Amino acid sequence: MEMKTRVGQNLRHFLTLKDYSKKEIENLIELATKIKKSRRMYRNLLQGKSIALLFEKPSTRTRLSFETGIYQLGGNCIYLDAESLQLKRGETMEDTARVFSRYLDGVVIRTFEQERVELLARNSTIPVINGLTDLYHPCQALSDLFTLYELGLLRKDIKFTYVGDCNNVLNSLLIGFSKLGLDISVGCPEKYRPIKEVLDYVLELSKKTGSNIKIYSDPVEAVRDADVVYTDVWISMGEKRMEEKISELRKFQVNDWLLSYARENVKVMHCLPAHREEEITSDVLDSEKSIVWQQAENRLHAQKALFVYLYTL
Ligand code: CP
Ligand code: NVA
């Protein structure tokens, strides 16, 4: 039997892009495109509904885009700093989920282990959205696919290269690209390749979808003739800074020299926040090649599209 939310619609979460089909991802991108053009669309969608943001890590874009998006859709947003909840004093996630489900109509969670998000979802009768875990950042990847689509770059003949640390953002991008049957190249140190769990999943999926996934340990080969180069921080939230890792990653810095191997009109992406002069230079981040501000804005439109999808099921 399909589970229903307490308000009656079919219950669907957004925990990882693994749970979404190619068609659904394409529909979400299409929806985000429409919403961006007509910002007052669906302005009553969340009327009378309260959505909480339960954040156990800092955030600028995710928090702001959700808070603003929920407001624009007519809903009420409650920001919950995990430090001030009884969770902090040992109330379980299961019990928290049961209580949330009695008051709220949805929850966005940003936390550490993916299992924590799944535990929340398993015990909730309201939609749960993953606003980043150590393993995945599906809202970011969805939004980035939308940005690429908007620029006419979500195509099979485009070389998209991610360079740097193989983290949550890359994991979600790998899943998104392989779901869509698109190609993705990764440039990373041999020692810091994508984790096996994700790599096995996308390599298996790519056999069905025709996606071509290449991993390079030479940054120049990874970036050679790329149309899009994407990077993210070398040390993610909650991770200890290891000098050995930083020194391995140094040759993967996105700078003018490395980009000279890419196509002349290459676009540079970064989910932000950036550590200037570490994974990316200011010269690149502030250059005409950079589309990072458009990327940041698009989080808002993509998040709104996600709500439309989850609340009109
Ligand atoms: N890109 C992103 O998720 O940014 P925040 O950490 O500021 O939310
Ligand atoms: N990989 C980064 C992404 C921040 C949006 C982190 O997890 O800190």
Image (spheres, rainbow, N blue to C red):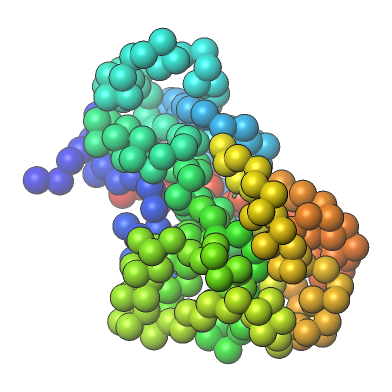
The residue shown at (74%, 69%) is: 251
Of residues 3 and 290, which is closer to you in this image? 290
Residue 263: x and y, percent?
76, 85
Q: Nearer the viewer, residue 287 or 7?
A: 287
Q: Quadrant of residue 208?
A: bottom left
The quadrant where residue 227 appears: bottom right
State the image coordinates of residue 168 (x, y, percent, origin top left).
51, 53
What is the x, y in percent for residue 150? 64, 69
Report the side of 132 relative to 227 (left or right).
left
Q: Is residue 154 above or below residue 106?
A: below
Residue 166: name its quadrant: bottom right
Residue at the (32%, 32%) spot, across then down: 120
Instruction: Tally the numbered discs.
Output: 0
Q: Residue at x 72, y 58 (%)?
A: 247
Who is closer to the viewer here, 231 or 242? 242
Residue found farthest to the front: 244
Answer with left or right where residue 291 lies relative to residue 180: right
Residue drawn at (52%, 28%), measured in percent from left and top? 56
Q: Is residue 27 left or right of residue 298?
A: left
Question: Quadrant of the image for the N terminus?
Answer: top left
Q: Is residue 19 visible?
A: yes
Please identify the residue farthest to the left as the structure is shown: 1
Asked whether residue 32 is in view, the answer is: no
Reply above or below: 1 against 172. above
Can you give x and y, in whole percent of width and height, for residue 214 in the image?
51, 81
